[in-house]
Image (tube, rainbow, N blue to C red):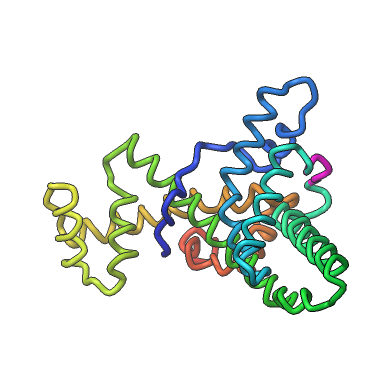
Amino acid sequence: MTPPSDGSRLDAIPTLWSVVRGAHAAGAPASAVAARQALVLRYAKAIRRYVGGVVRCESDADELAQEVVVKLMTGDFGGADPDRGRFRDLLKAAVRNLTHNHWAKQTRRRGTDAAVGRLAAPDEAADAWDAEWRRTVLDHAWATLQSHERANPTPPTFTLLRLRADCPDATGDELAAALAAKTGRPVRADACRQLLRRARLRFADALVPELRAGLADQSPARVTEELAALGLLEYVKEMLPESG
């Protein structure tokens, strides 16, 4: 279970598609600007990491990522529609098209096709985007869990999961001792095991809505398919019907 990366704390956002619609709402400029800022906050790091995986030049990657962010901020994703597929696929296509357009201009300007070799292969880029989206979804789920613990310190679910993530091979006794040291309260190993199970369920409760938010079809089967596609099933296996 990967802990959140630095700077991953996000404000609460009800659903992705509601934010996308709000970002392009007519007659409500203040709320639209706020919604666009929320989109940037939510996806800027994933966009930059993905562009960095597609474009070999760091300065060009910075420039292109900034261009995508500007497009988000100026409302250029107004045509995004949940009936046309997953938001992550629409955003990926937009980033990919922007990247190719950039290099096409560079090629024409230089009179050479050498720039093509500075882009990652399509399959490699697709894998990079899925990995970055997975990381973004996990970061948001971690941030939700952390915010919940700050408002409700007992039980310390975020703290315990962080300890487990940092020390995956720790025994039950060692984990209980580490949690006791963090919280200043004694914890039995058996109680720690029960708390860990509840913490994992709470993490799954935070993770699934993050993933569901970008899907037009939010049926359990479609959500499970998306979890599998991103390698996230392990985080919610205790919530699946077959686990009892």
Is 116 displayed left or right of 156 in the figure?
right
Is 37 displayed left or right of 177 in the figure?
right
Residue 226 found in image quarter? bottom right
| Closer-to-camera residue (154/241) | 154
Q: Residue at x 80, y 39 (%)?
A: 78
| Closer-to-camera residue (212/12) | 12
Quadrant of the snapshot with the N terminus = bottom left
Q: Say above or below: 161 vs 23.
A: below
Q: Say above or below: 126 vs 176.
A: below
What range of the chain is rendered magenta?
77-81
Residue 29 found in image quarter? top right
Q: Residue at x 77, y 56 (%)?
A: 94
- Name the spot of residue 19 as percent of width and height, x first: 67, 37
Q: Say above or below: 35 vs 211.
A: above
Q: Residue at x 78, y 76 (%)?
A: 116
- Name the spot of residue 150 as percent of width and height, x first: 33, 38
Q: Say above or below: 77 vs 131.
A: above
Looking at the image, the residue that sits furthest to the top is 27
Q: Residue at x 49, y 68 (%)?
A: 234
- Name the spot of residue 43 as percent of width and height, x first: 60, 50
- Name the spot of residue 236 as percent of width and height, x first: 50, 61
| Closer-to-camera residue (70/189) | 70
Q: What secondary structure predominates along the stretch shown in magenta?
A: loop
Residue 191 magenta-highlighted: no
Question: How many numbered discs sit on the rendered protein?
Answer: 0
| Closer-to-camera residue (170/58) | 58
Is 105 displayed left or right of 88 in the figure?
right
